[in-house]
Image: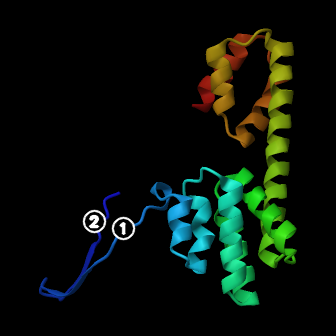
């Protein structure tokens, strides 16, 4: 947010030997319509970073611009980048669906890689959720009802710490043991 659109290069004595002004563009402040109006296919990969009122309409128009105005190699690369740069998973899924449905483009190596990364992240997230669920059940069995402040501390633990707590819980006799364990870890 500090960028004022001015840049300069300086000599060793501190005097300016080259300076220029430029327009700062903050994609998150730009609407998808404004980006589409520029009619620059290379910029369409950035549409997922803009504000979109009608995502399906905007994504369809962006993909159409890319497909109609680029070579096959450029097209595949730009569409893969469009998917990669969509920060919202729902928007990325919609864009992928539009690409496959309307243009039947083959899945690129980048698209496969993104899909695999998503699956691996999902598996890791599922493992962590499962471990946390087991931890909560063990805590209930060994300690009874866990007070909210202690439960909040348990939720803040990193996955390796949660695994250590699972091991420790087996020796707990009550909430006091949990409090002592958490105090040690801080």
Is any part of residue 181 visible from this angle? yes
Tell me which residue sits at (75%, 35%) in the image: 162
Badge 2 element: loop
Which quarter of the rendered picture does the N terminus lie within?
bottom left
* Residue 83 position in % (x across, y down): 71, 66
Residue at the disc numbered 1: 24
63 left or right, relative to 17? right
Residue 23 lies in quadrant: bottom left
Numbered-mark total? 2
Q: In the displayed structure, would residue 38 be above or below residue 11? A: above
Tell me which residue sits at (79%, 57%) in the image: 118
Q: Residues within 10 Å of mark 1 (few under 14, many from 20)?
A: few
Rounded to the nearest angstrom, the CA distance separating label 2 from label 1 is 7 Å
Q: In the displayed structure, would residue 36 be above or below residue 77? A: above
* Residue 120 position in % (x across, y down): 83, 57
Compare marks 2 and 1 and give the one earlier in the sequence. 2
Tell me which residue sits at (68%, 40%) in the image: 158
Residue 55 lies in quadrant: bottom right
* The disc label shown at residue 4, or none: 2
| Mark 2 in CB contact with mark 1 (< 8 angstroms) | yes
Tell me which residue sits at (55%, 53%) in the image: 51
96 left or right, relative to 86? right
Badge 1 element: loop
């Amino acid at each position: 947010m500090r960028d004022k659109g001015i840049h300069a290069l300086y000599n060793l004595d501190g005097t300016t030997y080259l300076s220029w002004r430029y327009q700062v563009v903050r994609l998150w402040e730009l609407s998808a319509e404004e980006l589409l109006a520029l009619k620059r296919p290379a910029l369409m990969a950035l549409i997922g970073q803009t504000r979109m009122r009608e995502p399906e309409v905007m994504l369809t128009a962006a993909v159409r611009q890319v497909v109609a105005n680029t070579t096959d190699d450029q097209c595949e690369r730009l569409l893969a980048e469009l998917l990669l740069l969509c920060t919202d998973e729902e928007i990325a899924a919609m864009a992928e669906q539009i690409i496959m449905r309307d243009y039947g483009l083959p899945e690129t190596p980048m698209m496969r890689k993104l899909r695999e990364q998503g699956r691996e992240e999902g598996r890791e997230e599922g493992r962590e959720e499962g471990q946390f669920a087991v931890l909560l059940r063990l805590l209930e069995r060994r300690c009874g009802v866990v007070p909210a402040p202690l439960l909040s501390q348990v939720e803040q633990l990193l996955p390796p710490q949660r695994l250590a707590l699972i091991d420790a819980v087996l020796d707990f006799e009550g909430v006091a043991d949990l409090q002592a364990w958490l105090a040690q870890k801080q």
